[in-house]
Image (spheres, coloured by chain):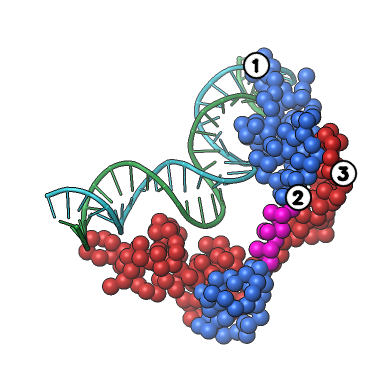
Chain colours: A red, B blue, C cyan, D green
Amino acid sequence: MGLTTSQLAQAVEINSETLRYYESRGLLPEPPRNASGYRLYPVQSVERLRFIKGAQALGFTLDEIKELLSLRANDRASKREVREQALQKVEQIEEKIDALETMRDALRHLIGQCSGDGPTSDCPILDGMTTHGIHAHSSTER
Amino acid sequence: MGLTTSQLAQAVEINSETLRYYESRGLLPEPPRNASGYRLYPVQSVERLRFIKGAQALGFTLDEIKELLSLRANDRASKREVREQALQKVEQIEEKIDALETMRDALRHLIGQCSGDGPTSDCPILDGMTTHGIHAHSSTER
DNA sequence: TATAACCCTGTAGCTAGGTACGGGGTCAAA
DNA sequence: TTTGACCCCGTACCTAGCTACAGGGTTATA
């Protein structure tokens, strides 16, 4: 009893090759096989894959998801550890947002200087590229 | 006369292999060679590479930068075309920002429900992963 | 029984933007 | 003349996360 590769793949709307890939990455445990060597996944795999997809949607990488899955499976693990991971992820996301906002603002600034017509020989946007360097953020260091 | 590969690479703080890579990608024109087949870049290459770096910092891909470079070189091209590209890039960036903010907010929401201590068996963050689906902005759906 | 629709494996390819390596040629100084 | 620092080329490798393919076995149905 259990789901075949294609059944599971369909159930969670994922490519069946991806299931094998997750198995090789250690995200999905090796499922039992039938007499012909076909994988037969337990129904819990559906939930596990939903977890993976959900965590991905929240920005976690597959390696991080592996971590989360093991925290979930480990009954000596604390909620605090999960919380830590989540907080760290929020920070990473905010760094990305900041970087993107800096880009956007710099672009907007250049666009604002563009008269909008005429040849590109004196285009403030193109000129801005070379002089740019993106000097906006200088406060954050590492 | 001209800069050797390593001189140019040093001048713009870029790996010299990257110069070859840009050449193969069509971002850098093939430079003249000396008798031994060594590349000798004209000084303008420095400015061109600064342009590339600047455009990258503003979020443009190498293919887009190639486009921008040809707009710059084409004296029949209009500032409007550049402006269009820039506006489109701003839009793309904002889409990314929105997606990241959605992630961040969802994560924060889950973190806010976490008591912070105890085993992970009833962790709202972990539980949130599976039920998530990342419901964009509205609260009730699916 | 034939044929489609599955299943298996290992490996290669994709995106994006590089970086590294191996094997070989060139050139200037000590 | 022998280092050592360059230069050349083609190709492989890297991150991340898949996706596809070739070549073979199995199962369900007509």
Residue B100 lies within the magenta run: yes
Image coordinates of residue A89 in percent, x first then y, are 64, 67
Q: CA gap, disc 2 to disc 1? A: 46 Å
Location of residue A105 in the rendering, given as x and y in whole percent from the top left corner:
81, 55
Query: Are marks 3 and 1 in one subunit?
Result: no
Nearest to N terminus: mark 2 or mark 1? 1
Residue, disc 1? B36
Q: Which residue is mark 2?
A: B87
Q: Position of residue B85 (x, y in %)?
A: 73, 45
* Marks 2 and 3 on same chain: no
The chain carrying label 1 is B
**Residue beneath the point at 57% across and 85% down:** B118
Up-down relation of residue A42 to residue A96 (above or below): below
Q: Is residue A128 left or right of residue B98?
A: right
Report the side of A43 relative to B127 (left or right).
left
User: Where does label 3 land, which residue?
Assistant: A115
Question: Magenta span covers which residues?
Answer: B90-101
Task: Return the mark for residue A132.
Answer: none
Q: Amino acid at mark 3?
A: Ser
Q: Which mark is in front, 2 or 1? A: 2
Q: Please, which chain is the residue tagged with disc 2 on?
A: B
Label the magenta part by its dominant secondary structure: helix
Alpha carbons under labels 2 and 3: distance apart: 14 Å
Q: Residues within 10 Å of mark 3 (few under 14, many from 20)?
A: few
Q: Are marks 2 and 3 in contact (CB under 8 Å)?
A: no
What is the three-letter code of the residue carrying label 2? Leu
